[in-house]
Image (spheres, grey):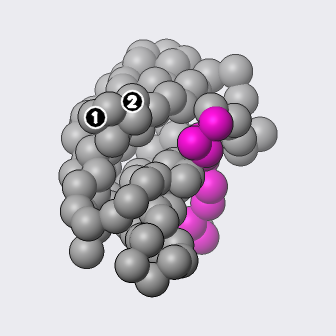
Amino acid sequence: QVQLVESGGGLVQAGGSLRLSCAASGRFSSINVMGWFRQAPGNERELVATINSGGTTNYADSVKGRFTISRDNAKKTVYLQMRSLKPDDTAVYYCYCNVFVSLWGSTTNHWGQGTQVTISS
């Protein structure tokens, strides 16, 4: 069982910054990939950014140059630093992780509960 606890969502005016955090806990051997997805009303859930165990990052084109994803392996936490926020960034942001469970010799995917990010204009 894996639990993902998100924090940092809120209301920010356009042009501002916000940092999201997500801490993982539970019974697993290692975390392969951590990341963030988001879903706005009327839209599909979309990938925002991911970071793998080697530090390789991947970003959606819409956030490149504005968002930065990072992770602290000791704390089992992933962060999303968001800058130059736009109203179009308004969405529920979901933490994601892919973990390796040695007992099963396989990986499993997990999602956080979501945190609301609202950008006013």
**Residue 5 appears in view:** yes
Position in image of residue 78 (x %, y %): 40, 38
Labelled disc at residue 75 = 1
Write down the residue under mark 2.
72
Secondary structure at numbered mark 2: strand
Q: Residue at x 41, y 19 (%)?
A: 17
Which SS does the magenta portion mostly show? strand
Range drawn in magenta: 44-54
Q: Is residue 22 left or right of residue 16?
A: left
Q: Is residue 24 magenta?
A: no
**Residue 14 appears in view:** no
The quadrant of the picture occupied by the N terminus is bottom left
Of residues 88 and 66, the one drawn nearer to the viewer in this rendering: 66
Q: Residue at x 39, y 79 (%)?
A: 103
Q: Taking 81 as reference, is 44 above or below it?
A: below
Q: Tell which residue pokes out farthest to the right in this image.
A: 61
Position in image of residue 40 (x %, y %): 49, 59
Few, some or many C-alpha atoms within 10 Å of disc 1 (few <14, some 14-19, many ≥20)?
few
Tell me the CA gap for discs 2 and 1: 5 Å
Residue type, label 1: Lys
Secondary structure at numbered mark 1: loop
Q: Taking 49 as reference, is 114 above or below it?
A: below
Q: Residue at x 42, y 71 (%)?
A: 101
Q: Is residue 38 left or right of residue 58?
A: left
The quadrant of the picture occupied by the C terminus is top left
Of residues 1 and 39, the one drawn nearer to the viewer in this rendering: 1
Q: Residue at x 69, y 35 (%)?
A: 56
Q: Is residue 111 left or right of residue 88?
A: left
Q: Give yes or no for contact between labels 2 and 1 (Cβ–Cβ under 8 Å).
A: yes
Q: Taking 96 as reference, is 108 above or below it?
A: below
**Snapshot quadrant of residue 90:** top left
Residue type, label 2: Asp
